[in-house]
Amino acid sequence: MAATMLRRSASDDPGRPHPEPEVPALPDDAVRLEVPLQAPAAGGRRTGAGVDGLHVEDVDHHDRLAAMRDGRLGSVHSWELVTAVDGPGTRLTTFLSGCPLRCLYCHNPDTLAMKDGAPVTAEELLARIARYRAVFQATGGGITLSGGEVLMQPAFAARILRGAKALGIHTAIDTSGYLGRNAGDAMLADTDLVLLDVKSGDPDVYRRVTGRELEPTLQFGRRLAAMADGPEVWIRYVLVPGLTDDAAGIERVAAYAASLNEIRPGAVSRVEVLPFHQMGRDKWESLGRTYELDDTPAPTVELVDRVREVFRAHGLTTY
């Protein structure tokens, strides 16, 4: 890794306040950048084409871990510039590697292991973000940190969010909320929008879908709603026939989302019902993993509409 990023300054001393990340200057030609926008994939989520355009550090294991602990370095799977997904406007979405969940329908199984990501410095990613500031301003967009699970790398995420806010850029994180305890108050103060993925309202179904417990996600959502000046929240719900289409489970998620608005009116401004798709099946096969939903069809338009109506019946704006 470049010496300028690995060296520790006096302000990196554990006994001193943690320094704010350096914010790169906006290049002179930023307003003239031509941005290739990608149409959103059917069903919503997808990953980018890798880390092309980002400098990847050459660093040994020990130095990599040390730099990741204090957020100077992140394990990045990919990045892309998209519109109509991952939040409002045109967004630079960065997919971080590492996730504690093992969702049956995960269509990014190549992001599950943190060790498989490319080492990219916060300084490098912020420089890339700065290049598109004019685009974000023109479209009402910004950046989204996704994964994997962004809260597997909280120190790196915090540096990126702080640097983006210093540039006047709208910020979002896409998270399951399972590791919500990793999101400090300072990080959330730099986050304008949380895309909270609630996989199921039934603890048993949630465990079947993810291999983990539901309660940490619910607690994180309640914490967000309890913040007087907390971030806007979009609830995301993936609708999988035969798995997450149980009427009682859907009602639980809708009631939960509505309860957050009782804590802080307007906390949940949007609910997205995302139809299941088979776009990740080939990745599972290429990784040599068993894909249990191989024969699961996409939900019908009628089913998706019925589920959206359940959320709307609770006074929620739903897409």
Image (cartoon, rainbow, N blue to C red):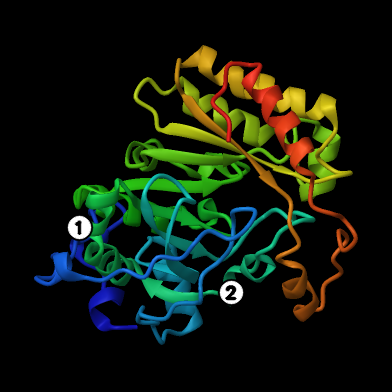
Q: Quadrant of residue 115?
A: bottom right
Element type at marker 1? helix
Picture residue at 39% right of the left edge, 35% below the top = 185
Measure how far apart labels 1 and 2 are at the Cα level: 34 Å
Name the residue beneath numbered marker 2.
Answer: 115
Q: Nearer the viewer, residue 125 or 38?
A: 38
Q: 39 left or right of 2?
A: right
Horizontally, residue 257 falls left or right of residue 182, namely right
Where on the picture, by quarter, is residue 111? bottom right
Using the image, tell me which numbered label, if any, was put on residue 234: none
Where does label 1 land, which residue? 134
Q: Amino acid at mark 2?
A: Lys
Q: Specify which label sits upstream in the sequence, 1 or 2.
A: 2
Q: Is residue 116 visible?
A: yes
Q: Is residue 258 above or below residue 134?
A: above
- Residue at the image position 40 percent from the left and 65 percent from the top: 37
Q: Considering the image in quadrants, where does the C terminus appear?
A: top right
- Residue 187's place in the image compared with 82, above or below, is above
Q: Name which residue type carries label 1.
A: Ala
The image shows residue 202 at horizontal and vertical percentages of: 80, 31
Q: x and y percent of residue 135 in the render? A: 25, 58
- Picture residue at 62% right of the left edge, 21% below the top: 312
Quarter of the image where the N terminus is located: bottom left
The picture places residue 22, in percent across and down from the top left corner, at 20, 61
**Category of crowding for the residue at label 2, using alpha-carbon neighbours closer than 10 angstroms: few (below 14), some (14–19), many (at least 20):** some
How many neighbours does mark 1 have within 10 angstroms: few (below 14), some (14-19), or many (20 or more)?
A: some
Which residue shows up at 34% across the image and 66% down it?
Answer: 72
Query: Mark 2: which secondary structure?
Result: helix
Where is residue 108 shown, x and y percent of the image? 65, 65
